[in-house]
Image (cartoon, rainbow, N blue to C red):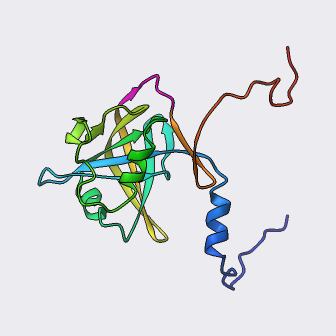
Amino acid sequence: MTQNKPSPESPPALDAKAYRRTLGCFATGVTIITTRRASGENVGLTVNSFNSVSLDPPLVLWSLSLYAQSLPAFQEASHFAVNILAADQVQLSQRFATSVPNKFEGVDVTYGAGGVPMIEGCAAYLQCRQEYRHYGGDHIIFIGSVVEHIRTDREPLIFCKGEYMLGRPLRPESAGGASK
């Protein structure tokens, strides 16, 4: 059996814009990750790098740029919330994706485990205790243990190829599969 050995040469540089467009072909849900500073200030940002890690124990992950202004708040926090946005929350997604000074102004929230803000009207919520952090390139990967979760009947917001979208189930007959 022959094993491929890594080349001692660096891989060729990728075209960053083309790489981003390629990654954009993977549809994701849209979340706002929130926490609360020790001072009581709510902190949050739009994230689509969210993913489930494990069902047993229940673990999730998301990543944040090393250059994000909110990084210290998340590094110091014991908990964070994953607010999975509903289809009618595009404006909230856009607002929390910017660096406006008070993103929470006029936004209705309740507070969950560890005092984390949870944005009203979302499709689902995960309240998490921060467990691990790992450096990965120009980001930190946060892994949290889910301590509480809430699901509603609201349709989730989806993002793909640089656009917000709505999901719809594919039935075998509409996907070219065999019908029963």
Q: In the image, is residue 104 part of the stretch drawn in magenta?
A: no
Q: Where is residue 106 in the image (x, y as percent from the top left)?
A: 23, 43
* 130 w.r.t. 170: above or below: below
> What residue appears at the point 31 percent right and 63 percent down from the top-left corner?
71
Task: From the viewer's perspective, tell me whether residue 4 is left or right of residue 72.
Answer: right
Report the magenta residues as a range.
149-155
> What residue appears at the point 71 percent right and 76 percent down from the top-left corner?
6
> What residue appears at the point 34 percent right and 49 percent down from the top-left corner?
131
> What residue appears at the point 11 percent right and 54 percent down from the top-left corner?
39
Q: Quadrant of the N terminus?
A: bottom right
Task: From the viewer's perspective, tell me whether residue 28 is left or right of residue 149.
Answer: right
Q: Quadrant of the C terminus?
A: top right
Q: Position of residue 141 (x, y in %)?
A: 43, 58
Q: Position of residue 33 (x, y in %)?
A: 36, 48
Examine the image and state in which quarter residue 45 appears: bottom left
* 101 w.r.t. 13: above or below: above
